[in-house]
Image: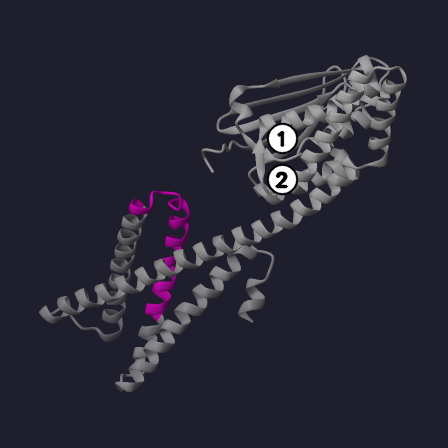
Amino acid sequence: MLKSLLSKSWFPSSDRGFWLLQFGGWAGYALVNYIGSLMHEMRDIYGVVLVLGAYSGFLLTLPLRYFYQRVWEWHPLLLMFVVILASYITACLWAVVDNATYWEIYKFGFTPDSHLAYFKNNIAKFYIVLSWSGLYFGIKYYRMLQNEKQKALMASSMAHQAQLKMLRYQLNPHFLFNSLNAISTLILVQDTAIANKMVNRLSHFLRFSLDNDPIKKITLKKEVEALMLYLDIEKVRFDERLEILIDVSDEAKRALVPSLLFQPLIENAIKYAIAKTEEQGVLSLKAYVERNRLIVQLCDNGPHAPEQPELLMKNAGVGLKNTRERLAALYGDEFTFSMTKNEPQGLCVEIVLPFETLESV
């Protein structure tokens, strides 16, 4: 019955565990004390006292949960002091409520022994509330550890899937055909120097895509270098019709990003924007660091960009979906992936990631 009530929509799934433990824990506390009272042949009314005491403990520990959520990120030593202090204050309030309950039911006055009993009762309740706090932090840390493990497993799985999908991009027959055809043309016109250069770039790009573990991160500087290998191959296809603008700050070059993160996005831009424009095609990559966040913007000047670019995600191909899913697996809620219209025409993709460097990991 209780479980079915807690499963209703007004209880978020993340809170159900807390409420089940809160109800069950205090009910168990009352039951254990009641069984102990039977062994000492206490009056029947004492059962009511125990229920009221457990109910008071239940209510008084609820604010602790929301208080601990606010101080969760504090320094461990300060947090420990605050938890002990909060537990003692809660125990004192609980002892006061218990004492008032005893007085109302038994109608006895205060005596010198009463003060000693109150002090002992206060200490006992302090240990109970402190134990409640310890269980709260222990369970919360355990859940966080399990979430991190689950996120790591998901990231590993998604990264391997992303690698397979990106390999399909990189080994796409059309891409290889266009690259080899361009190299063949250079050989026919006896431009062997550029043909040799393109073969080397194609070889280095494919080697880079195979050697880099998608789970690990590389510096943005290396990522841009790999991206330029791919773009140099595409520039042979488009000749003077493709212009590439790179604007990456020195600080951003040190940032760590998933390997080959931008290649599917650039390939989409070439396929759906640059290849369809009759004018000069422009691809721009801008990256900078702001407020400890890495901001990367990929833009093109292709025609026919939708008025609401975000709607592209609903009918997006493998590239966009794969990139967003991979970022979600690696960063959870700590990233943003958005698309906006470029001015005067085209599409911009903006990715915001936590700023991480080799020194910080």
Q: Give the image quarter of residue 84.
A: bottom left
Tag 2: amino acid:
Leu
Which residue in the structure is indicated by mark 2?
A: 327
Task: Pick the residue in front: 255 or 189.
Answer: 189
Which residue in the structure is indicated by mark 1?
A: 351
Q: Where is residue 50 in the image (x, y as percent from the top left)?
A: 32, 73
In the image, taking residue 81 as reference, residue 179 lies left or right, namely right
Q: Position of residue 10 (x, y in %)?
A: 57, 56
Q: Give the image quarter of residue 90.
A: bottom left
Q: Give the range drawn in magenta.
A: 52-78
In the image, taking residue 194 as reference, residue 85 lies left or right, namely left
Query: How many dots with numbers?
Result: 2
Q: Crowdedness of circle 2 by 10 Å Cα count: few (<14), some, many (20+)?
A: many
Q: Is mark 1 on a helix, strand or loop?
A: strand
Q: Is residue 324 above or below residue 194?
A: below
Task: Pick the residue in front: 70 or 221.
Answer: 221
> Which quadrant of the figure contains the N terminus?
bottom right
On residue 152, which mark appears?
Answer: none
Q: Position of residue 157 (x, y in %)?
A: 65, 50
Q: Crowdedness of circle 1 by 10 Å Cα count: few (<14), some, many (20+)?
A: some
Q: Are marks 1 and 2 in contact (CB under 8 Å)?
A: yes
Q: Which residue is drawn at 77% across and 37% down?
A: 169
Q: Is residue 136 above or below residue 213?
A: below
Q: Residue at x 59, y 25 (%)?
A: 221
User: Residue extending furthest right?
Assistant: 188
User: Residue extending furthest left?
Assistant: 112
Q: Which mark is first along the chain, 2 or 1?
A: 2
Q: Is 2 colored magenta in this rendering?
A: no
> Can residue 308 be seen?
no
> Can residue 131 be seen?
yes
In the image, taking residue 24 as reference, residue 96 lies left or right, namely left
